[in-house]
Image: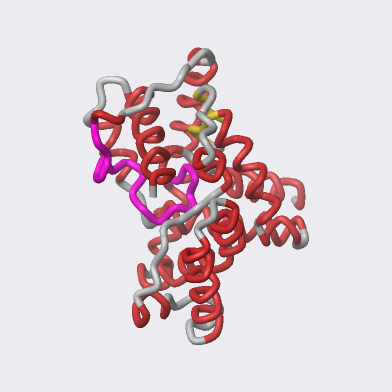
Amino acid sequence: MKKSVAVFLLIMAMTMTVVVFQARAQEDPFSDEGIDEQEQIEVADPLEPWNRLMFQFNDRLYFWVLKPVAKGYSFVFPQDARVAIRNFFHNLFTPIRLVNDVLQGKLDRAAKEFARFCVNTTAGVFGFNDVAARELNLKVPDEDFGQTLGHYGMGHGFYIVWPVLGPSSLRDTFGLIGDLMLDPLSYINAEQSLMMRSVYTINTTSLKIGEYEDLKKGALDPYISVQDAYLQYRLEQTRK
């Protein structure tokens, strides 16, 4: 029984499918807003057969597992509660954004991140309430190690779709590994970490249901559409 629960938690914790790829970001990853079409980037896709297979796997995982669980979750928890939980995790992941701000030399953003953390952890009650944004207008773009590598001129290398984790690239895969070193959930009890990552993933997905479906509905080739959306999204993040 314990093994079954652990496996389920592992699946939920790792299920960062195309809807929540690089899921710490709060923006809409499928939006083209702010992206100059002249600057669309092309990334090599030498692993396309593998990538398409993993895309299909993740697609089914989303529709068969993650979406039904997220819909049930949203039925139990009202939107205000889910937004509060999203705020809590956003506050919890502050070290990732703060360190990458420093690494990129964005010291003004680092100072704002630190101020946000202090305000939201105290006045915002452990981050459940984003007082810093609402009352002090303290808002800064998200940063991660993949963006830091891009900031210093490292290209994507090649596109890759990971099972369960979703779309990525060679650069962003290394970036994810770097971010794990800064992730507070990496330093707590394994079972507690899995539980919290599961809640994070399900909660995030519950607030984004419909985005992936809309993208697929209008796409001649959903694989290419998701690839383009991911690369455009990461380009926009790196440029900020």
Most common SS among magenta residues: loop
Left or right, 214 with respect to 66, comes to left
Is residue 207 shown above or below 50? Answer: below
Viewer-proximal residue, 162 or 150? 150
User: Which residue: 40% across, 56% down?
Assistant: 26
State which region is magenta.
Answer: 20-37
User: Which residue: 47% across, 17% down?
Assistant: 44
User: Which residue: 44% across, 53% down?
Assistant: 25
Q: What count of labels does the image hold?
A: 0
Image location (x, y in percent) of residue 237:
41, 46
User: Which residue: 64% across, 47% down?
Assistant: 8
Is residue 155 shown above or below 24? Answer: above
Image location (x, y in percent) of residue 85:
48, 68
Is residue 173 shown above or below 33? Answer: above
Viewer-proximal residue, 214 or 226? 226
Viewer-proximal residue, 68 or 155? 155
Image location (x, y in percent) of residue 160:
53, 25
